[in-house]
Image: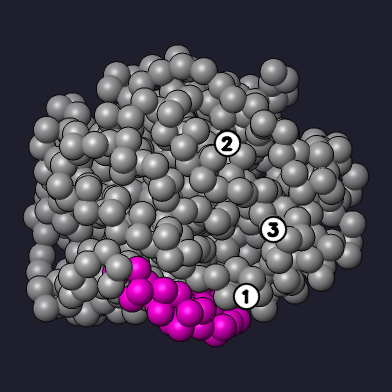
């Protein structure tokens, strides 16, 4: 593969994270007031290396964390050379307790399509690790490459996908589709038996407070492989649910109990605040990035900006005493609540912005319109033969879930109501807008921990393609349905779903997408394992799509 021209900056070691106390949830103002004193127990100086993100053709956002006795003014510099003999952009930024000592700034005045080095300098002359970043191209663009990640659970094992991408040094941008952290307490997910013995989670409790969320990010960001990825590549990132709580939506979450865990609005505000402190991201809930005349990347929020409460098949069939009664209840639900034409996953304002953006991107001649987002858009239902195949060799709770999925499929309902499948009217509106814009839609998705490739359609007309990335470390179907050989499982799912052209239900890793005016080429890179630190791959899978075809070659 073709390597990037710029060398990577020198590797640096991580800083250890010590345990600290947490405080009770008593409202956002009390949480913020109590945080700074406890936030300083991660060490001093540059504690978590550097990161960059939000690239544009003339600017990039820079991040670091510097802990001192009080507010500290840091100098920052950007240069085309690692020795900083000629500075292209420079300025100052403040690190303070109010932001957990995280500092962010936008470096402007840069040239398009160029690698840069950057660093921060403390008042005492201490210099941060040197980072590397890249601006987006402007005008005619022949090629652009992205490494795409999702679902990195610290406790299950090592982030070998991050390590491989940094070592491969063959992309222009890192894209993270969410579940960058997980909110669960120790022994929950992973369970005590699943947890890697060398991956100690902090804090041990489920994160609820400002101090909790900050400590969890500090734990993740102390990982050397994640630090290295941020150090050598700019990132565009979106949050999914676990940055706040499992299966979250704008007004609540499956893993949030107001009676014992307080006001959801407080927890959501804390989660958003800490994400924006610790990540190299802007405060905008959604944004667009022009990659020359080649593509527009649309970073969207399908999770908490405008999403209504996800439907639950279990709730629909609750109280029914026979499969026939359950199917009848599901059928009625399908024709009423499920078919609600006003149902939202993006919210009206974001949906209008996105549809207008697709039209503008297509009108300016961009070849690809890429959705950087969280959950699967393709239509996916449960394979009807799966439950019969499993026989009696399956735990009862899994059997109940599979039975509910099979009944839902029989009633014409999808497998996963937390995905776009749970919001069919919103998906129809987006697809209609994409078709009217003559967009060449390429959808990226994470969330499921497995790999997917869909050909998307609307009322029989091709709309675009979707590529779902497998997880960095979170387990997939192979953990819960270990009695089914992975190849057979993937085959069953593909056979049961017309839009689905390929699936991998058993491997961890990431994918690299190369865009050119002629085609999109996706290489799935499967990690050789996550129980030990390694950049060895178990294999790859290449999928292509010719520009304008809205079809896949698998």
Observer able to see residue 242: yes
Observer able to see residue 85: no
How far from the left and from the top, in percent, is residue 70?
Answer: 29, 58
Image point 28% across, 54% down: which residue? Answer: 403
Image point 26% across, 76% down: which residue? Answer: 264
Alpha carbon distance from label 2 to label 1: 29 Å
Judge whether 33 appears above or below 120 on screen.
below
Q: Report whether 513 appears left or right of 401.
A: right
Secondary element at image label 1: helix
How far from the left and from the top, in percent, is residue 135?
Answer: 71, 45
Mark 1 is surrounded, within 10 Å at the Cα level, by few (under 14), some (14 to 19) or many (20 or more) other residues, namely some
Mark 3 is surrounded, within 10 Å at the Cα level, by few (under 14), some (14 to 19) or many (20 or more) other residues, namely some
Q: Nearer the viewer, residue 236 or 349?
A: 349
Point out which mark residue 457 bears: 3
Q: Name the residue under label 2.
A: 502
How far from the left and from the top, in percent, is residue 174?
Answer: 57, 40
Q: Quadrant of the C terminus?
A: top right
Point out which mark residue 529 bears: none
Q: Report whether 284 appears left or right of 146.
A: left
Q: Quadrant of residue 243?
A: bottom left
Image point 46% across, 17% down: which residue? Answer: 538
Q: Give the range drawn in magenta.
A: 326-350
Point out which mark residue 351 bears: 1
Secondary element at image label 3: strand
Mark 2 is surrounded, within 10 Å at the Cα level, by few (under 14), some (14 to 19) or many (20 or more) other residues, namely many
């Amino acid at each position: 593969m073709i390597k990037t021209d710029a060398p990577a900056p020198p590797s640096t070691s991580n800083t250890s994270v010590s345990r600290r106390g947490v405080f009770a949830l008593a409202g956002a103002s009390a949480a913020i007031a109590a945080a700074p004193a406890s936030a300083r127990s991660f060490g001093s100086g540059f504690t978590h290396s550097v990161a960059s993100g939000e690239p544009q053709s003339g600017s990039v956002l820079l991040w670091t964390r510097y802990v001192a006795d009080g507010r500290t003014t840091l100098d920052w510099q950007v240069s085309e050379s690692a020795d900083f003999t000629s500075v292209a952009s420079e300025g100052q930024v403040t690190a303070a307790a109010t932001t957990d000592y995280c500092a962010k700034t936008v470096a402007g005045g840069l040239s398009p399509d160029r690698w840069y080095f950057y660093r921060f300098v403390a008042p005492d002359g201490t210099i941060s690790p040197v980072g590397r970043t890249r601006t987006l191209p402007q005008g005619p663009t022949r090629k652009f490459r992205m490494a795409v990640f999702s679902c990195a659970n610290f406790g299950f094992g090592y982030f070998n996908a991050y390590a491989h991408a940094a070592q491969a040094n063959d992309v222009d941008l890192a894209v993270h589709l969410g579940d960058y952290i997980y909110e669960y307490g120790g022994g929950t997910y992973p369970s005590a038996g699943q947890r890697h013995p060398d991956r100690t989670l902090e804090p041990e409790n489920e994160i609820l407070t400002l101090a909790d969320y900050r400590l969890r990010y500090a734990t993740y960001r102390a990982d050397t492989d994640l630090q290295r990825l941020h150090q050598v590549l700019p990132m565009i990132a979106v949050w999914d649910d676990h940055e706040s709580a499992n299966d979250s939506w704008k007004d609540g979450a499956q893993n949030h109990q107001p009676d014992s865990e307080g006001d959801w609005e407080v927890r959501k505000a804390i989660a958003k605040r800490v994400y924006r402190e610790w990540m190299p991201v802007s405060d905008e809930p959604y944004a667009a990035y022009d990659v020359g005349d080649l593509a527009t990347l649309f970073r969207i929020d399908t999770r908490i900006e405008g999403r209504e409460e996800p439907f639950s098949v279990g709730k629909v069939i609750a109280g029914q005493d026979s499969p026939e009664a359950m199917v009848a209840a599901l059928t009625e639900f399908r024709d009423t609540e499920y078919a609600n034409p006003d149902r939202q996953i993006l919210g009206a304002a974001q949906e209008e912005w996105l549809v207008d953006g697709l039209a503008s991107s297509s009108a300016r001649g961009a070849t690809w319109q890429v959705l950087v987002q969280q959950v699967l858009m393709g239509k996916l239902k449960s394979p009807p033969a799966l439950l019969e195949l499993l026989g009696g060799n399956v735990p009862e709770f899994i059997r109940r879930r599979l039975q509910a999925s099979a009944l839902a499929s029989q009633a014409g309902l999808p497998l996963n109501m937390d995905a776009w499948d749970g919001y069919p009217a919103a998906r129809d509106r987006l697809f209609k807008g994409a078709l009217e814009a003559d967009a060449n839609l390429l959808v990226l998705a994470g969330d499921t921990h497995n790999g997917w490739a869909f050909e998307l359609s609307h009322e029989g007309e091709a709309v675009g393609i979707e590529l779902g990335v497998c997880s960095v470390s979170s387990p997939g179907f192979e953990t819960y349905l270990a009695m089914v050989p992975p190849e057979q499982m993937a085959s069953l799912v593909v056979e049961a779903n017309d839009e689905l052209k390929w699936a991998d239900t058993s491997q961890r890793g990431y994918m690299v997408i190369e865009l050119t005016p002629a085609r999109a080429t996706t290489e799935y890179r499967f990690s050789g394992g996550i129980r030990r630190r390694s950049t060895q791959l178990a294999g790859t899978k290449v999928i292509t799509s010719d520009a304008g075809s809205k079809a896949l070659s698998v």
